[in-house]
Image (cartoon, coloured by chain):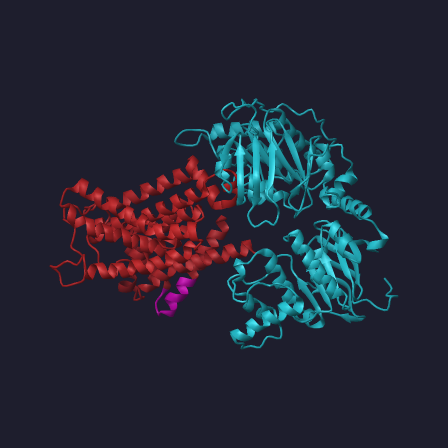
Amino acid sequence: MRPLQAAAVAAGTLAAAALLVALAGASPLAAARALLDGALASPAALGETFARSTALVLTALGAVVAFRSGVLNIGLEGQLLAGAAAAAAVGPAVGNLPFIGRLAVLLAAALAGAAWVLPAAWLAERRKVPAVLSTILLNLVAAAGVTWLVRGPLRDPAGDYPQSRPLADALVLPPLVPGTRATAAVVVAFALAALAAVVLGRTALGLKLRAAGLSPRAARAAGLDDVGLRTGAFLASGALAGLAGGLEVLAITARLYDPFSAGIGFTGIAAALLGGMAPAGSAVAALLFAALGAGSSALQRDAGVPSALASVVPALAVLGLLLARGRREAP
Amino acid sequence: MNGREGGFALELSGISKAFGPVRALDGAHLALRPGEIHALLGENGAGKSTLVSIAAGLVPPDAGTIRLAGKPMAFRGPRQARRAGIALVPQHDLLVEAATVADNLAFLDPAAPFLESRRARRERVARVASALDLDVGPPDARVGELPVGTRQRLEVAGALLTDPSVLILDEPTAVLSPDETAALFRALRARASTGKTVLLITHRLAEVFAAADRLTLLARGRTLREAAVGETSAEEIGALLLGSAEATERTGAPEREAPPADAPPAGGVAVDGGGGGTGPSPALALRALRPRGSAAPPVDLAVAPGELVVLLSIDGNGADDLAGAAAGVREAEGSIEIGGRKVRPGDPLAYRRAGGAFIPSDRRAEGLLPDLTLAENLLLRRPPGGLLVDRAAMAATAADRLARFGVRATGPDARAGELSGGNQQKLLLARELEPLPRVLTAIHPTRGLDLAASADVRARLLDAAASGAGVLVVTADPEEAQAFGRPIRVVYRGRLSEPLPSGTPFEALGRRMAGLAA
């Protein structure tokens, strides 16, 4: 996307958001101030922004890896839930050995995320079922699965609420800076973003993945295993989303409850779109959306604007982006 | 042109149509008499399909008049044309695959009521099949499971439901076996004898001279010849067709003299016998190979190491499919061996592993990745470097190859989509010929290229053969086939001729391509 176009999309998004704030009966300037305060003004606020960015960065990476290889994986939300469920199932069972326990939890989460992709991958390659459809439907199955798990097999017998047993305190990741919610999970997410950028941009595998995504037919005729590449990227994408769910449990919630995610997987796709389907850009966009989320509670408290308005902004940004791109690509 | 015979069933005169900068039709004329089978001929891009689309109301003309039985018409859409009595059977049927024969026929019937019982739909099938003497398949069969010949009869039956005064068929025989073709022509003749008119688009001269009464030849949007079949000969029409084909195929002006054929030095490494050393096993051996869904007979063909074989055919005769099947990009039945090693049909990766290289006919969609750089395109399979791609080495290797294959570009980091057609083809050659493959399959490797670029591509292919590769080339241009100086095998309806010497006269090749000589 050209800089001018990006600026136009940003300006348009801000203008639309300001209009909505004005319609809600508040001053756009006061709202912006409250938002910035809530997201950036204190160590705690900044920590909240980074803590929220973890799952968004990882699901955005999942979208990038899949989309660039030609798979429209809309099921990141479901794969995240699968990962969180696996983490909550394995976590209480591994006791309180920090290193081994955390490794086991994250491995289980990544594997569960990839496993949640398997039916969609099989349907796509063997039965020509579009991944868009199968992954959307698997989201619903995953959400229902979480509902059942926290009321059934994983229910914490000690609590009154339908939620799973908590992880041992020794397993839960401590804050990097005391008084904040930001943990090592943030570092993991951004490190994986850097790794994804290197793999896609600088390795032979990345070149082949991009080729298969640009034209499966030409890649196949040139001797690349497009089916293998696509399937591998699809599974990796699911593993990233599963890891997002696992880290959410390990760093923030320590257990599974219902509903666990309010559309993190979808906001991740929005971040990937806004980030131009590149790992670095998507990580920045994810951070931006995380700041919006972190600031949204201050928005309600200090400016009297419904916090739900903040979650409208990513949608507005993506719509603006698609509008701009549509204009460019129209004949 | 003056309707002296007491009026035409349908007359289109002075028809012009442009799509953007492309002039598809330029004052074309077509006149059909009642009770005749009329053939519309012309090379790809001559404007045949546009002309019949205008007649059938699918496309409005920019200029010109349409007269149906003498009355001027201006169709606002296909429904109106259909109601007026013009029905078009498209080249690729537009049936609903998931629905049954009975349902499809109901969809095609403008008189079908809004609500109709299954029984009534089944009865329509029986009625139509007996009235038209066309086997359209069992009423409850799903169309997607029917053979192509049956599907086509179904589409024809649908067009005939309204008993149109003019029936237009776009390349109806392309997918039919000889028996099916004969049956179709019998049905069309029966229809013409009742005073109705049939317009047939075809590439096949033999069919024209066997089945049609009159013909119209289009070339580059204009009517080149209108004649009764008895007034002309297959030789005359064949020569006109091939002449116009050359003119359309070679639009780019040659920039320089064609280089001499004593090929430039490429990285020619002789292939050591390869698979097992059991004598000279062929580089490529096809046994009873038959592309899936094709009506053509199974084919046997062997290409020895160092040999270049030219398959010459008019489009739609199965040469492309056969070569695509050999390269694994088309599903097929039968056996493929490369250097004595069996290769699973329909698996392009197995073909590559056995040492096969491939130049597809559509270099933009199947050959290159236009969004990747030249270097990425060239070294896609094995980019240099270890864990990370060595970009410097990649650029250097690519620059070297681009220079040796004469690709003119700003550099190895340019996007492949920015190159001209000739340079894209040279880029493909640079990717496919290094390292030297055991066998190379090239489909229309010079299509759309100017003379100099074509000569260069031919020299590279001959050079690869001289270095020990087996090369299989498909072309539709007899002069091109002759220019290779290697044996030519003409493909007509999927059948291969015996190897013909490259000195075979142009006219003789043209006759064989049209199916006029066995």
Q: Is residue B233 left or right of residue A317?
A: right
Residue B323 appears at what percent x and percent y?
59, 40
Front-most of residues B498 and A25 = B498
Q: Quadrant of residue B518?
A: top right
Question: Where does the N terminus of chain B fall, quadrant-wise?
Answer: bottom right
Is any atom of residue B411 visible in this view? no
In the rendered image of the structure, the colour used to display chain A is red
Residue B129 colored magenta? no
When the figure is inspected, residue B237 is found, relative to residue A225, above or below; the finding is: below
Q: Is residue A169 left or right of residue B448?
A: left
Query: Could you say which quadrant of the image residue A266 lies in?
Result: bottom left
Instruction: Give the residue displayed 64% in from the left and 66% down from the top.
Output: B157
Stretch of the chain drawn in magenta: A16-27
Q: Is residue B386 above or below residue B364?
A: above
In the figure, A48 relative to A26: above or below? above
- Lateral position of residue B279 relative to residue B211, left or right: left
- Residue A179: x and y in percent read 19, 49
Residue B144 located left or right of residue A317: right
Q: Position of residue A147 (x, y in %)?
A: 24, 61
Q: Predominant secondary structure in magenta?
A: helix
| Chain B shade | cyan
Whether A25 is among the magenta residues is yes
* Residue A27 shows in this picture: yes
In front: A193, or B269?
B269
Query: Image point 57% across, 73% down: which residue?
Result: B123
Q: Quadrant of residue B193?
A: bottom right
Foreground residue, B354 or A305?
Answer: B354
Vertical side of A215 occupied by B452: above or below: above
Find the residue positioned furthest to the right: B4
